[in-house]
Structures are given as structure tokens and as C-alpha cells.
Amino acid sequence: LAILTRAEFVFYPIVLFFYLLGICKWSVKNFLKRFFVFYLLIILTLIPWVTRNYIVYKKIIPLTTYHGGLAFWTGNCSLASGGWAYPLNYKETMKRVENLGEYEQNKEFFKKGMEELKRKPGRMPFLFIRKILVHWAPFEEGFKLFNAYYAGILLLGGAGILFFRKRGIKEGVLLSIFFATSVAAIIIYGDPRYRYPYEYCLIIFSSF
């Protein structure tokens, strides 16, 4: 359920939508003919969770009511360097919002994250680059542990993507996964565990 509703994973169906729309030459009619059932299944999967949130909060909330804002805040605070870190005012903020509902807490965390980014906008490009490196680099536990197996897969998969793929729609669907998870890392924070569900795609390109 987490992979369907947490904010970290919402970018893939959005990125895939624009890719498939481009395949359909930006024709909504053609898109609906070819991919309506696919997105209908996504909507049907989310309906129970959206219904639950509406019953509890009287609002249409398609994703988690808590973790998205917290992840955004901890990934963009002044102490974050690509991964997540506890903000300087973490304990004070958590104490201040402890009596609020999850939805209200989530909004407060997003607000805190935006304040962190606005405070020093000049660090944003470097922070975003570090997020991608933390997300994709063959290291674990904050660059303390080298993952030799994944390093080989990353090298061969990158070569397969650059030089050997046939540029078909199936490969484009797989590449959109990489793009979507990279966007999630830039917005939230980089973490190897967020790429784990997609490493099998690199193995496919490695075989090329």
C-alpha cells in the first residue's frame, strides 16, 4: 500500500502519462483509446484509500496524510546534504504540532520545507545534484559502504541505455521509471532504498 499512496512514488504515473501522451502524438483521444484501462486500474486501486481519507478528513486526499511533508522537510533542511537530516528546530516543531491531525501536520511540514529552501536558494542546485548522487551512486549508508554488485549493474545498464537500446515504447516505459524516481529524489531526498524497486530495470538494460 505504501508504494501506491506515499508521495515519494506519485511521480511515476505522472511522468508516464506525459510520455505515453507523447507516444500518442499529444492526442488525448488516442491516449484514452490505448491506455485508458491502465490508468483506470490505478484509479480503482486508490479509491479505497481516497474514500478512507474523505471519511476521516472530509477532503479528497489521494496520498498519505503524513510522510510526504515530513520527507520534504527533512530532505531540504539546512543540514541535509543529499539524504535526509533532522532539521535544527525538529523537536520544537514536532512538539508544537503534536495536537494537530496528520493532514494538518503534513501541511506544516511542507511549509517548513519551503521555508528552508527559500532561506538559502543558492544552495538548491548543489543540493539537488547531491540528491541524485545519493540516490543512484553505488554506495550505501551515506557513502560509507560500496556496493560492488550494483556498481557493475549501474555501469552496464548505463552503457545499455546510451548505446544499445532500440528506442521502442517498452524501453521508454522503463526509462520513465528512472526519470520519475530521479525527480522524486530531487524534490524530496536521495536514498538507495527508493531505487531498489527499480534496479531490475537496470538489469534489463545491462543484458543489452
Image (cartoon, helix red, strand yellow):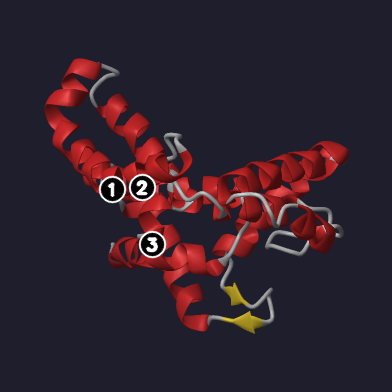
In the rendered view, tell whether residue 47 sits above or below residue 159: above
Q: Between label 1 and label 3, give the one nearer the viewer.
A: 1
Measuring from the top left, give residue 24's x and y in whole percent: 23, 24
Q: Nearer the viewer, residue 4 or 29?
A: 4
Which circle, 2 or 1, is nearer the viewer? 2
Within the image, what quadrant is residue 93 found in? bottom right
What's under tag 2, amino acid-wise?
Answer: Arg
Mark 2: secondary structure: helix
Q: Position of residue 13 (x, y in %)?
A: 35, 41
Circle 2 Cα neighbour tier, 10 Å, few/some/many (<14 / 14–19 / ≥20): some
Q: Residue at x 19, y 43 (%)?
A: 41
Q: Residue at x 45, y 43 (%)?
A: 11
Going 62% across and 43% down the picture, which residue do you hit? 104
Q: Are marks 1 and 3 in contact (CB under 8 Å)?
A: no
Q: Are marks 2 and 1 in contact (CB under 8 Å)?
A: yes
| 122 horizontally vs 28: left or right | right
How many angstroms separate mark 1 from mark 3 (CA)? 26 Å
> Badge 2 is on which residue?
52
The amino acid at mark 3 is Tyr
Q: Residues within 10 Å of mark 3 (few under 14, many from 20)?
A: some
First in sequence: mark 1 vs mark 3: 1
- Helix, strand or loop under label 3: helix
Q: 99 and 63: which one is in front?
A: 99
CA gap between label 2 and label 3 equals 29 Å
- Separation of marks 2 and 1 at Cα, in angstroms: 6 Å
How many numbered badges does the structure rendering display? 3
Label 1, secondary structure: give it.
helix
Q: Which mark is residue 48?
A: 1
The residue indicated by pointer 3 is 198
Q: In x, y percent, where is residue 114?
A: 74, 39
Quarter of the N terminus within the rendering = bottom left
Q: Are marks 2 and 3 in contact (CB under 8 Å)?
A: no
